[in-house]
Amino acid sequence: MKQFVTFPFSLYKNHKYWVPPIIQDEIDNFNPKKNPVFETADAQFFVAIKAGKIVGRIVAIINWFEVDNQQIKKIRFGWFDIVDDIEVSRALIAKVKEIGVKNKLNYIEGPVGFNNLDKTGVLIDGFDHIGTMITWYNHPYYHKHLEQLGFVKEKEYLESKFKFKNVDAVYFDRVSKIIKKRFKLTALDFTRTKDVLPYVDEMFEVFEESYSKLSTFVPISAPQIAFFKKKYISFINPEYIKFVVDEEQKLVAFAIVMPSFSEALQKAKGKLFPFGLFHLLKARKYAKEVTFYLIGVTPSYQNKGVHAIIFDQYTKTFAPLGIENCIRTPELEDNEAIKKLWHKFDPTVHKKRRTYRKDL
């Protein structure tokens, strides 16, 4: 498993834009004894070896909730990395196809992870921008291999960024006050992680309500939420987590933003010790770039301007910290609601990524 996880470190050695994971964290992610996603999913891991050297890797994934409950008969593939040799890609995809046919599934889609909290899509544009800890980076030939093997576009995702100075603080302060008064809502800000934790389960309820209509959605189980809580929440700046509650203290909206850990992870080179943790903690405190990871509003409050409360919160948090750039995670190109949400910030699309599909 360590060989599987570390293969990209040789493929992208000294690469300017590739962001490595923490090796042990990635190994734990693939361990059924540690990651509860394996309660509802199966995964098989493959490497391609040529002349005694690893030249490619892939994970074949069946999310059984998706197959059995949602009746979406697909086999997923992810963590797809290859040298520029079409035969390597052909051999790896053949294993995924073999497992899909054996399980009587209808098509392959990837690269995707186990569920909506995992990385998604192969980069097709924007190769000259640094990756993030929540996206895959890849060489330009990846998607060409998939197309050569008969895959076609399934879904396309856009990544964009904007300058924090583009945010009109006066506007959001004014609108936020109006919306809070009109719907009797309260914004919650935090300075301690322990104060955030009691809301996390409810946050995922709102997450599910917000995203369940998307074609990509697969529910997140309670054990998976606990795993996410342990893995991420304690490391995210509590002041970067925002909640909005109604007059009965019921959560109606949330957002999670993370400082950019990209350069820190490059310096860490896959290891927390002896110096990796220092670089990550430094970025957590001083990074001038942030990544909007998740944002959700419960359906009964959508299209009522509640997002203005969240943006007002962030404006007041980020201004004293000198935040300069805001990055958005991949969003479906046909998600018109999310486009309307961000249009006031004059965002620039700087990356495009895609999942590919092939019938079995």
Image (spheres, grey):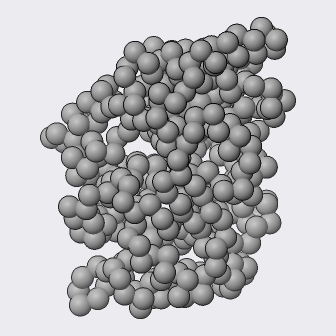
- The answer to which of 210 and 318 lies nearer the viewer is 318
State whether residue 227 appears in this view.
no
Q: Give the residue at x 52% y 81%.
A: 146
- Residue lying farthest left? 274
Percent x, y of residue 171: 64, 18
Taking 207 as reference, is 316 left or right?
left
Q: Residue 113 appears in which quarter of the rendering?
A: bottom right
Taking 184 as reference, is 231 left or right?
left
- Residue lying farthest right? 300
Q: Residue 54 appears in which quarter of the rendering?
A: bottom left
Q: Looking at the figure, which quarter contains the N terminus?
A: bottom left
Percent x, y of residue 60: 53, 72
Q: Residue 139 appears in which quarter of the rendering?
A: bottom left
Percent x, y of residue 164: 47, 30
Q: Looking at the figure, which quarter contains the C terminus?
A: bottom right
Q: Give the residue at x 79% y 60%.
A: 70
Percent x, y of residue 199: 62, 23
